[in-house]
Amino acid sequence: METRANEFDERVGRLQMLEAIELSVGKSVLELGCGSGQFTPMLYERFDRVVGLDASEENIALARKTTLDNRHSFFVAKAEDFQIDEKFDTILMTMLLEHVDSPVAVLKNAKSLLKSDGRIIIQVPNANSFNRQLAKYMGLIQDLHELPKEQIEKYGHKRVYDIKMLIKDIEGAGLVPIHRTGIVLKPFTNAQMQLICNGHEEKWRCRFVDALAKIGERFPLECAIICVVAVKPERKGYDKIPQDA
């Protein structure tokens, strides 16, 4: 199954990982749904211990090639079933929950693998993104939560989240959402964004995506991606995101 649509999408993926790293804590990280490990090497400089997980044997075989360091490990398993005799400071779920059968089961299992003072960083596609709103007003989709056939068949999507849906699943798993943000204001589809990038030099393409990220900081609820940080209830010193976030 394909994971990144094109070069534009890969650039966005790098921004997602940079945001996740900035929000991380501690020295150990569990990356649930690491795929082929395309962005996992970005974690090696930040963490002493990196564990990657994916349900695809093919993906994990590729991910293992990203490191020869025995401090880092990769496993083939479903995120809702994975167990290991250690707990982690940070757990990453980058574009995972929209693919799984039971997001709450995945979040509950992640909670069991999290240290008491750790945090889970969750990133999912945003139903209220600017490009989806544009598609609705153009009559290309009837509902903001509608999944195009390509997203179902090619990318294995089962749902698209809005912020309230995500908070509901997080709280349903017994976790507390403490921070939310958005990543990249994307005006059009990935294929259309790639067409805009085509024909421009590398420097221009970098500036273009960086500018979309900067604009996204001003309009987080309309960004392409929702990012929420969650912690265990016993962790003190944080305010819960309100239900109407």
Image (tube, rainbow, N blue to C red):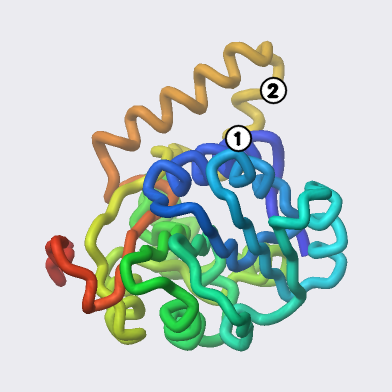
How packed mark 1 is, by other alpha carbons closer than 10 Å (few <14, some 14-19, many 20 or more), is some
Picture quadrant where residue 179 is located: bottom left
Q: In which quarter of the image is the N terminus?
A: bottom right
* Three-letter amino acid code at the position of disc 1: Arg
Question: Residue 155: x percent and y percent?
Answer: 68, 64
Q: Look at the numbered disc 2 and give the secondary structure of its residue.
A: loop
Name the residue located 30 percent from the left edge and 49 percent from the top edge.
181
Name the residue located 65 percent from the left edge and 29 percent from the top edge.
195
Q: Which mark is residue 198?
A: 2
* Three-letter amino acid code at the position of disc 2: Asn
Question: Residue 48: x percent and y percent?
Answer: 58, 50
How packed mark 2 is, by other alpha carbons closer than 10 Å (few <14, some 14-19, many 20 or more), is few
Q: How far is disc 1 from disc 2 in space, using C-alphas?
A: 14 Å
Q: Which of marks 1 and 2 is nearer the N terminus?
A: 1
Residue 138 visible? The answer is: no
Residue 79, placed above or below residue 118: below
Question: Residue 109: x percent and y percent?
Answer: 49, 84
Viewer-closest of 211 and 239: 239
Question: Residue 55: x percent and y percent?
Answer: 73, 75
Picture quadrant where residue 194 is located: top right
Q: Look at the numbered disc 1 and give the secondary structure of its residue.
A: helix
Viewer-closest of 153 and 54: 54
Q: Name the residue under label 1.
A: 11
Name the residue located 76 percent from the left edge and 75 percent from the top edge.
76
Callout in the foreground (1, 2) = 1
In the visual, does 206 lie left or right of 77? left
Residue 200, placed above or below residue 180: above
In the visual, does 65 lie left or right of 156? right
